[in-house]
Amino acid sequence: MFSNSFTRIFLRFFPLPKILSEPSFGLDISDESLKFVQLIATKNGIRVGRYGERDIPLGVIESGKIKDSKKIEEILSTLKKEEGIKSVRVSLPEEQVYLFTMKLEKSGLKEVREGIELAIEDHIPISAQDAIFDYEVIGENAQYLEVQVTAILKNIIENYLLIFKRSQLSVKSFELEAQAASRAVIKKTDMDTYMIIDFGKKRTGIFIISRGIVVFTFTLDLGGVTLTNMIQKNFNISFDEAEKMKEEYGLERNTDNKEIFAVLLNSVSILRDEIVKHFLYWHTHKDEEGRNNPPIKKIIFCGGDSNLIGLTEYISISMKSPVEVANVWTNILNTENYIPEMSLGQSLSFTTALGLALGDFNEDN
């Protein structure tokens, strides 16, 4: 469901001290990999420190749920030792988080949290005792308080916390991937509405951001690997060869091998249709007061496979809407004065990790 109000989606399970005297690390954990980025405050502005990626074996994490805690502890402990990481900001799996808006009657209401606990099972399929939730008051009148609630199963958070504790890593915050990504690619002062498409290896996140706040998230089980597998199967070649073909030709019609375009289009059209569905819903849905949502100004692609040749052009032409590849340095640094070592493809893969690390430099955090 879409939220009818603009909300700040941030899980404040931990106090968020502003620590600019020590490096800030963002840690983006997915089912297949762990990406980390270090941002450092210098007299010349923010600079990129250490960064990298560690593979997570198949089955260790599934849809954000940890299945093999010992293996993750081993990966984190090695990361701490090799990179000198002491504290991190960590992404939470979108698939395991519930977002909803609810109204609480002021009459007889003593404590907001208690009011939410009493009604939470009317909105999500988990009980109050099994959930950890955060809330923010987003509106009120004489009769009601309107709150945005972000909830997750308690045992999921407990599992993550235990793993970090055993790895001797301090967690500053847990955040939604969408919030971290938006912090990286949308100017902090920009209050317009955007759709962010995080096109990763195995899945795609579709987020809507308005007035600097995440108002919708959706996860699609389709990513760059899907495209590579289609090429591999169609041409009966190795995965590595298929990956090279994908990177070389992409969605260009005028190539030596037009068959690649047709093969990729089958999967990309699924992505396009999903984007169109949520794009249209946003523009046709009205809130309880009958007001239209603000129009989406632009669609922004990030994620490791978002720089696929011809992808943004195809989506833009199909939807007749502005589409561009993200600039992940928007709120971090001026590339005219300083060019990080990361290539464009690398920086897009590290969008969430960069946004997480940037949290230490935001005044509101």
Image: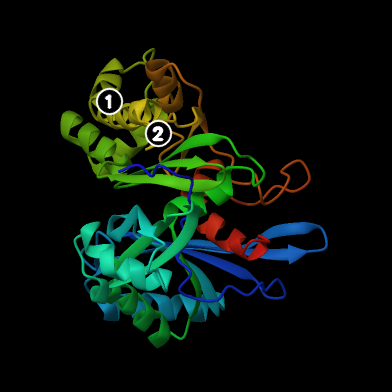
Residue 47 vs residue 58: left or right?
A: right
The image shows residue 119 at horizontal and vertical percentages of: 27, 64
Task: Tell me how many marks there are.
Answer: 2
- Point 34% across, 74% down: residue: 157
Q: Nearer the viewer, residue 204 or 117?
A: 117
- Which SS class for mark 1? helix
Q: Which residue appears farthest toward the right when viewing the image?
A: 43
Q: Is residue 272 left or right of residue 89?
A: left
Residue 8 visible here:
no
Mark 2–mark 1 Cα distance, whole angstroms, equals: 18 Å
Label 1: few (<14), some (14–19) or many (≥20) C-alpha neighbours in 10 Å: some
Please provide percent x and percent y for residue 115.
34, 68
**Quarter-wise, where is residue 131 in the image?**
bottom left
Which residue is painted at 47% across and 60% down in the image? 136
Task: State whether residue 156 is above or below residue 93.
Answer: below
As drawn, which residue projects farthest toward the top? 254
Residue found 25% across the figure and 29% down from its top: 270
Amino acid type indicated by mark 1: Ser
- Quadrant occupied by the N terminus: top left
Quadrant, the C terminus: bottom right
Mark 2: amino acid: Glu
SS assignment at label 2: helix
Which mark is drawn over residue 247?
Answer: 2
The residue that label 1 is drawn on is: 269
Find residue 121 and report its horizontal and vertical position in percent: 22, 63
Image height of 228 relative to 50, above or below:
above
Q: Residues within 10 Å of mark 2 (few under 14, many from 20)?
A: some
The percent coordinates of residue 308 (x first, y second) are 42, 32
